Image: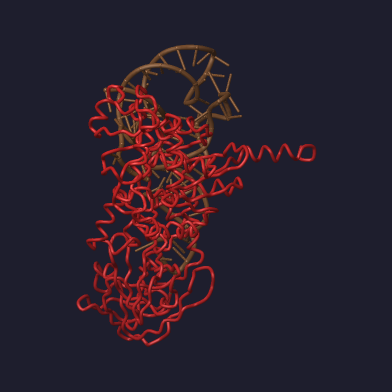
RNA sequence: GCUCCGAUAGUGUAGCACGGCCAAUCAUGUCAGACUCUCACUCUGACGACUGGGGUUCAAAUCCCCAUCGGAGCACCA
């Protein structure tokens, strides 16, 4: 069979191994996709899904990946100036360097052009209703009086909207849809409103007072960018129906769309960008890369690898159900990458001093890595530090093994003391003595910042040479060495 | 209230478009054991799911209907 029809076998194998994670796409022609965040905060784990999935598809199908900043709300969801670069930086780190970067607030005049065309086609009108007033009418499928204004009037009003003649709230431009549409969410939606707060970007600042809303800006942009496939959160499913009115008036072709549900992460719960902003401002968190914060920057600082995050996001697939997941899977993925390369060191948290009577000063030798070879050397005298939790429930006379050093027997509990009883591994193998790790008294002062608090203690020398690397503190977990200052080391906790 | 949408083990997924090969895939998790001078890694084993009820059919996780549960939108937010 193999000889007769090798291509059949190959085909069978392919059928057996469907694409793990993302469903295959039916791409005809070019694929253009975009990830469109509002940079009103740094990219979060949630953003990474959008970045990874969009870029993964465009990679796979040789398409174009665009990042577009939907920053057209200078007031309520005011963009954060630093965040623009953070997005680009995190994208690059994730291996998702965009082919094109677009900033909506740079392209306002283009949106104005489309607005004028829509008005001329009778597809949009300037509405002076108060919000409540309009809603009341809309709820009973009734048009407001402004809906019937002719094009000339609308054009005049529109000019006045642009020139700043109206106050905020005084006038909006609405897209004429179907005022009796069965879904109230669709009825004559707002495309532009007036905001007199200057935009945070200095190049834009107070240049405009009429700002497009997302549905309008996105509609025009997706057409201009030639987007062929949109993947976005299901909170925007109705956008398609709304935006199609614009596309129909203009005679454009609407892109394909796909949606995904909300992602919630157990470890972080419901943290909103604005909530985080507040917590950072009041000092609850140290910044946007505090290990307790769900941003990509924080994960990076903790030593999560881009590949692990990518894989994690891809394997979520594209479901419309809301999902709630635990970072354990991400950690497992990361551990697979990091475990073979991370050097091992001793770090003693909550250190307790232990004197070992009868021990000769020596140099302990321990492998840098259990399977890779290379040794570290730790000079040690008669005094070591051990973890408080390891010696809390000891009995007098108990025998222990100090890992890679020697055996001891406890001779006193307070103060803690012990005596040297040899180096033979039989203590562990036959007597099943516990092995604990330790640190020399002249070690480094180490602080570990982790999602559930800070640990401080003493680490062996050598750690200071691992700046920026992920290492494993034995019996503690993986950490990334974040800073070294003299004899003081700061590490960020990666995971168990 | 109106309009959409979804439901497979603790979690996340595969399978559903073309019903049988599904007593249901993979990963993670949990438990047990092996290995190991780490409670890490690796290995072995166990645990664990088609929301419920009807219908169509020789045959349903897959198709249809109802119910239940969950979610989204109904903003001059994105």
Seen from the viewer's position, the closer of residues B1 and A173 is A173
Seen from the viewer's position, the closer of residues A96 and A13 is A96
Residue drawn at 39 percent across, 27 percent down: A177
Give the quadrant of residue A391: bottom left
Residue A426, above or below A301: below
Residue drawn at 24 percent across, 73 percent down: A396
Seen from the viewer's position, the closer of residues A336 and A248 is A248
Chain A: colour as depicted: red
Does residue A496 appear in the picture of this structure? no
Seen from the viewer's position, the closer of residues B46 and A450 is A450
Question: Is A365 displayed left or right of A144 in the figure?
Answer: right
Chain identifier of the brown chain = B
Residue A28: give x, y in percent of width and height.
Answer: 62, 37
Please, which residue is most extreme toward the right here?
A4
Residue A6: give x, y in percent of width and height.
Answer: 75, 40
Residue A199: give x, y in percent of width and height.
Answer: 34, 54
Residue drawn at 29 percent across, 38 percent down: A171
For the C terminus of chain A, the image quarter is: bottom left
Residue A224: give x, y in percent of width and height.
Answer: 52, 43
């Amino acid at each position: 069979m193999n000889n007769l029809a090798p291509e059949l076998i190959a085909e069978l194998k392919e059928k057996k191994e469907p694409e793990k994670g993302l469903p295959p796409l039916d791409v005809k022609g070019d694929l253009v996709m975009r990830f469109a965040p509002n940079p009103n905060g740094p990219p979060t784990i949630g953003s990474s899904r959008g970045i990874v999935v969009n870029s993964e598809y465009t990679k796979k199908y040789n398409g174009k990946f665009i990042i577009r900043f939907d920053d057209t709300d200078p007031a309520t969801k005011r963009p954060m100036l630093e965040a623009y670069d953070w997005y680009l930086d995190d994208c690059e780190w994730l291996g998702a360097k965009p082919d094109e970067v677009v900033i909506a607030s740079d392209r306002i005049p283009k949106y104005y052009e489309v607005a004028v065309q829509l008005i001329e086609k009778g597809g949009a009108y300037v509405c002076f209703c108060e919000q409540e007033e309009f809603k009341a009418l809309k709820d009973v499928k009734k048009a407001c009086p402004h809906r019937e204004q002719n094009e000339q009037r609308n054009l005049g009003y529109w000019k006045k909207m642009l020139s700043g003649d109206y106050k905020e709230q005084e006038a909006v431009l609405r897209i004429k849809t179907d005022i009796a549409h069965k879904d109230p969410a669709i009825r004559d939606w707002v495309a532009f409103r007036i905001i007199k707060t200057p935009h945070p970007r200095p190049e834009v600042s107070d240049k405009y007072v009429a700002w497009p809303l997302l549905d309008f800006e996105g509609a025009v942009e997706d057409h201009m960018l030639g987007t062929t496939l949109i993947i976005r959160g299901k909170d925007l499913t109705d956008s398609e129906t709304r935006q199609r009115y614009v596309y129909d008036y203009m005679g454009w072709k609407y892109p394909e769309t796909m949606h995904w549900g909300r992602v919630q992460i157990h470890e972080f719960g419901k943290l909103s960008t604005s909530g985080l902003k507040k917590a950072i401002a009041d000092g609850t968190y140290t910044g946007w890369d505090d290990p307790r914060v769900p941003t990509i920057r924080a994960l990076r600082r903790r030593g999560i690898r881009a590949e692990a995050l990518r894989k994690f996001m891809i394997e979520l697939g594209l479901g419309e159900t809301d999902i709630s997941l635990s970072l354990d899977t991400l950690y497992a993925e990361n551990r697979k990458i990091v475990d073979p390369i991370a050097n091992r060191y001793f770090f003693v948290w909550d250190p307790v001093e232990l004197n070992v009577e009868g021990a000769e000063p020596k140099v302990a030798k321990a492998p840098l890595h259990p399977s890779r070879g290379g040794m570290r050397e730790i000079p040690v005298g008669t005094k070591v530090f051990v973890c408080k939790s390891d010696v809390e429930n000891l009995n007098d006379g108990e025998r222990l093994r100090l890992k890679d050093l020697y055996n001891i027997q406890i001779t006193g509990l307070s103060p803690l003391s012990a005596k040297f009883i040899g180096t033979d591994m039989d203590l562990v193998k036959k007597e099943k003595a516990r092995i604990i790790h330790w640190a020399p008294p002249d070690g480094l002062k180490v602080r570990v910042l982790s999602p559930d608090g800070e640990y401080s203690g003493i680490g062996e020398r050598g750690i200071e040479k691992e700046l920026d690397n992920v290492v494993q503190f034995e019996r503690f977990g993986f950490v990334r060495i974040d800073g070294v200052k003299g004899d003081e080391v700061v590490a960020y906790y990666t995971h168990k």
